[in-house]
Image (spheres, rainbow, N blue to C red):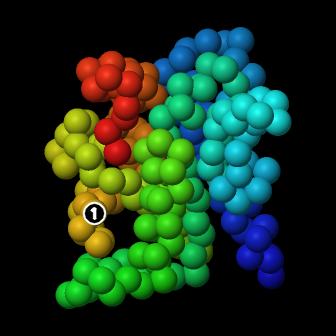
């Protein structure tokens, strides 16, 4: 039986590989290295250029300059759970009641907000292939995902999250489209990303 930590590390590596494939499909550059993204050294870690300059935060970070724009926009949090308690979140009548899953999701959102990034909370239930992307809905509405994917919405403590199958999202929105949309949005809003 695998130790829980090794399962989490394996999932982070899986997400790093998926993000690498996603970016390479748009960048179309044969000279790119095998890995463009990799797992952070520790949970929710920071990749530093030198001791005083933090480049990127999160469980999966860009490790090649061609994908640094992604790291400037997104904070990736990866969680692998034995079971996912989404139904109790959806059934939750009182907004102040938050399950363990909801608390972890809100903590991740707080971590992303603290470093001025968009949260990509990617979760996978054990023994399944598919993972889900949770992100504040404002950061994905511009891609009209409702028409292209199996999208759900979740309200938690007054915040609307969009839930999308992760691989499906990567197949519908290209890396180039994602980056250009946020660069455009940042320019239009005076330098801040819509979270």
> Image point 69% across, 36% down: which residue?
54
Residue 96 visible (yes or no): yes
Q: What residue appears at the point 72 percent right and 68 percent down from the top-left corner?
A: 7
Mark 1 = which residue?
A: 159
Q: Residue at x 53, y 32 (%)?
A: 72
| Looking at the image, residue 192 lies above or below residue 150 | above
Out of 31 and 58, give the one closest to the viewer: 58
Above-or-below relation of 4 to 165:
below
Position of residue 110 measured from the top left corner of the image (x, y, whole percent): 47, 59
Q: Give the quarter of the figure containing the N terminus.
A: bottom right
Res 150 visible: no
The quadrant holding residue 16 is top right
- Judge from the rendering whether residue 122 lies leftward or rightward of residue 10; answer left or right: left
**Percent x, y for residue 184?**
32, 20
Farthest-out residue, front = 52
Judged from the image, the secondary structure of the residue bearing numbered disc 1 is strand
Which is nearer the eye, 155 or 39?
Answer: 155
Where is residue 167? Give x, y as percent: 45, 48
Q: Residue placed at 76% from the left, 56% from the top?
A: 42
Vertical comparison of 48 with 189: above or below: below
Residue 153 in the image, given as x and y percentages of width and height:
24, 62
Question: Within 10 angstroms of label 1, few (less than 14), some, or many (20 or more) residues?
Answer: few
Q: Which quadrant is the C terminus positioned in?
A: top left
Q: Is residue 149 left or right of residue 114?
A: left
Q: Quadrant of residue 151?
A: bottom left
């Amino acid at each position: 039986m695998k130790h829980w930590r090794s399962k989490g590390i394996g999932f982070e590596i899986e997400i790093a590989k998926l993000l690498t494939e996603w970016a390479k499909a748009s960048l179309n550059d044969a000279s790119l290295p095998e890995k463009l993204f990799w797992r952070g050294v520790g949970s929710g870690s920071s990749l530093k250029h030198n001791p005083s300059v933090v480049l990127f935060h999160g469980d999966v970070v860009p490790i090649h300059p061609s994908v640094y724009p992604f790291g400037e926009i997104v904070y990736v949090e990866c969680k692998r759970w034995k079971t996912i308690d989404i139904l109790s979140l959806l059934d939750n009548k009182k907004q102040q009641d938050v399950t363990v899953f909801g608390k972890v999701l809100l903590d991740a959102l707080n971590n992303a907000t603290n470093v001025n990034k968009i949260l990509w909370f990617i979760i996978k239930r054990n023994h399944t292939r598919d993972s889900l992307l949770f992100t504040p809905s404002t950061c994905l509405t511009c891609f009209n995902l409702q028409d292209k994917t199996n999208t759900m919405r979740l309200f938690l403590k007054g915040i609307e999250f969009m839930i999308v199958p992760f691989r499906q999202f990567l197949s519908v929105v290209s890396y180039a489209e994602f980056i250009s949309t946020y660069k455009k949005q940042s320019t239009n809003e005076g330098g801040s990303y819509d979270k």
